[in-house]
Image: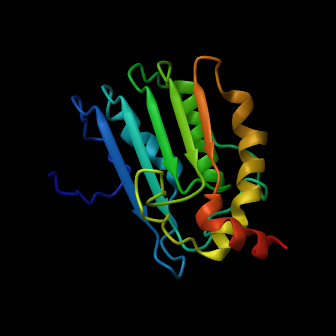
């Protein structure tokens, strides 16, 4: 078993020439301090020319980033082709401008991309093979779901090449459905 490594990004001077699979788990503290600019993770992509799969798990108890609906001017990074990146999954995806920017950058520059999964839940998701429920979600994050889905439709779907399968995972109806209905009503 590999031990997790804690690093500060961006890490521009370091290259991970042989890195093929990267999982980044970001846990934001409950008081919202330390909001992380997810768009800066582009530096990991640039530093990992052999990267094939990227998994990003963003856990936050409340929305601490500026929504794309507050400021829709997307930042751009210089183009850098990523020839091996085939699969990207972002859990805890929301309407944070910096997450939308990261997804758009990946769609534009990952020329071998086959699959992009945007999961509106963070952490564990239940399945038919497990008796475990989805991780509990904060009410404010569940209430963010309609904005997240709208942001995906508005800013991401039209950028998805025909060769890429986009999968958007909404909150689980079994674990979160009734609570989400109550929160939104």
Q: Which of 139 and 131 is in front in this view?
A: 131
* Identity of the residue drawn at 48% across and 57% down: 126
At a point 58% along the width and 27% down the height, the residue shown is: 165
Q: In which quarter of the image is residue 123?
A: bottom left
Residue 61 placement (x, y as % from top left): 55, 74
- Up-down: is 104 above or below 122? above
Q: Nearest the camera: 78 or 176? A: 176
Rendered location of residue 91, percent (x, y)? 51, 52
In the rendered image, the residue lying farthest to the left is 1
Q: How many labels does the image show?
A: 0
Q: Residue 52, relative to residue 89: is it above or below? A: above
Q: Would residue 182 be found to the left or right of residue 104 on screen?
A: right
Residue 12 showing in the rendered view = no
Q: Residue at x 58, y 17 (%)?
A: 163
Q: Which scheme is used to colour this image of the protein? A: rainbow
Which quadrant of the figure contains the C terminus? bottom right
Q: In this view, does 183 lie to the left or right of 41?
A: right
Residue 82 at x, y = what percent? 43, 24
Report if residue 58 is visible in the image.
yes
Q: Residue furthest bottom?
A: 31
């Amino acid at each position: 078993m590999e031990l997790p490594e804690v690093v500060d990004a961006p890490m521009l001077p370091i290259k991970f020439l042989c890195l093929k699979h990267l999982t980044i788990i970001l846990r934001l503290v409950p008081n919202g301090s330390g909001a992380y600019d997810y768009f800066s993770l582009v530096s990991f992509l640039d530093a990992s020319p052999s990267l094939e799969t990227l998994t990003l798990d963003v856990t936050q108890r409340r929305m601490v980033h500026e929504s794309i609906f507050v400021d829709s001017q997307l930042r751009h990074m210089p183009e850098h082709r990523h020839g091996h990146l085939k699969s990207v999954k972002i859990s805890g995806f929301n309407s944070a401008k910096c997450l939308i920017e990261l997804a758009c950058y990946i769609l534009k520059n990952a020329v071998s991309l086959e699959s992009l999964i945007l999961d509106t839940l963070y952490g564990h998701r239940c399945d038919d093979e497990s008796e475990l429920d989805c991780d509990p979600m904060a009410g404010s994050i569940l209430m963010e779901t309609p904005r997240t889905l709208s942001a995906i439709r508005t800013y991401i779907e039209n950028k998805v090449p025909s060769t890429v399968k986009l999968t958007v995972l909404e909150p689980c109806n079994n674990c979160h459905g009734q609570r989400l209905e109550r929160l939104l009503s």
